[in-house]
Image (cartoon, rainbow, N blue to C red):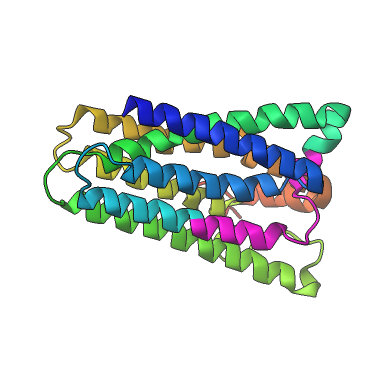
Amino acid sequence: MILLALAVAIFLCAWMAGVWAYQRAVGNGGWTDVYWSFGMGIAGVACALWPLGETTTRQWIAGALIAVWSLRLGTHLFRRVAGSPEDPRYAGFRKEWGKDFQPRMFGFLQAQALSGALLCLAILVAARNPAPGLAWSDVAAGLILAGGIAGEGIADGQLARFKADPTNKGKVCDVGLWGWSRHPNYFFEWVVWLAWPVMAIGPDGGWVWGWLALVGPAFMAFLLIRVSGVPPLEGAMLKSRGQAYADYQARVSVFFPLPPRS
């Protein structure tokens, strides 16, 4: 498994180097999210199904789950990025980094590649859980991942419909899930990664390596809340929406869905 994990890390670094070249050619950093999603799908399926012995039903389930996640997220981002202005986060980086944007962007994407390799460890140990047959934990993992995908899709749909209404131009979306969390799409993306430790640890937690899958949701929460998700997007929204977004921050939870404050 160690060699497979190393191969996945090398693949993702090479993949994101290609993505860097593409975004430089088209002048839109938003494409990096699209191809990171697809690259993670390829890497995740390899973690689940690469033959290291007899392929189990659990491996096939894990491979199918990560493939569905990747296709859903990558397709959604593709539709959002194609023909649209650059994502506010990357536009902010471009302005902040100035002439150093491309070199720093390369380093940023390589960090994303290594982050993806770390996340793939959760998939790897979940798929390779040696417990015989299937258990309730495998079913629970599938339901958790499906719920995360569904929640993210609902949040994305609500935001798209809000933006499509011309009367909402310049306003802050606070309808539906967006009235309970400022970033419900990020929250449900985190929920997806809760599935892997459930599958990896299993009902009795007897496989020691399975506990390594906890790195998935823990590291994803760190990335979304502290690094590449919430902070740059919040900064961009404050610049574009001003006091309206500050008022939104005052009444709506930043990540976990909670009843809005009056």
Q: State whether residue 179 appears in this view.
A: no
Indicate left or right for 44 with 57 as reference: right
Residue 94 place in picture, x, y as percent = 82, 37
Region of the chain picked out in magenta, as a range: 71-92
Indicate left or right for 27 with 113 as reference: right
| Number of marks in picture | 0
- Residue shown at 39%/59% (left/top)? 147
Residue 239 place in picture, x, y as percent = 82, 44
Q: Is residue 188 above or below residue 233?
A: below
Q: Is residue 1 above or below residue 160?
A: above
Pick the quarter of the image with the C terminus. Answer: bottom right
Residue 76 place in picture, x, y as percent = 59, 61
Q: As drawn, which residue projects farthest toward the left?
A: 132
- Residue shown at 31%/56% (left/top)? 142
- Residue shown at 18%/35% (left/top)? 205
Q: State whether residue 19 appears in this view.
A: yes
Residue 69 place in picture, x, y as percent = 45, 55
Q: Main secondary structure of the magenta part?
A: helix
Q: Nearer the viewer, residue 11 or 114?
A: 11
Residue 119 lies in the magenta-colored region: no
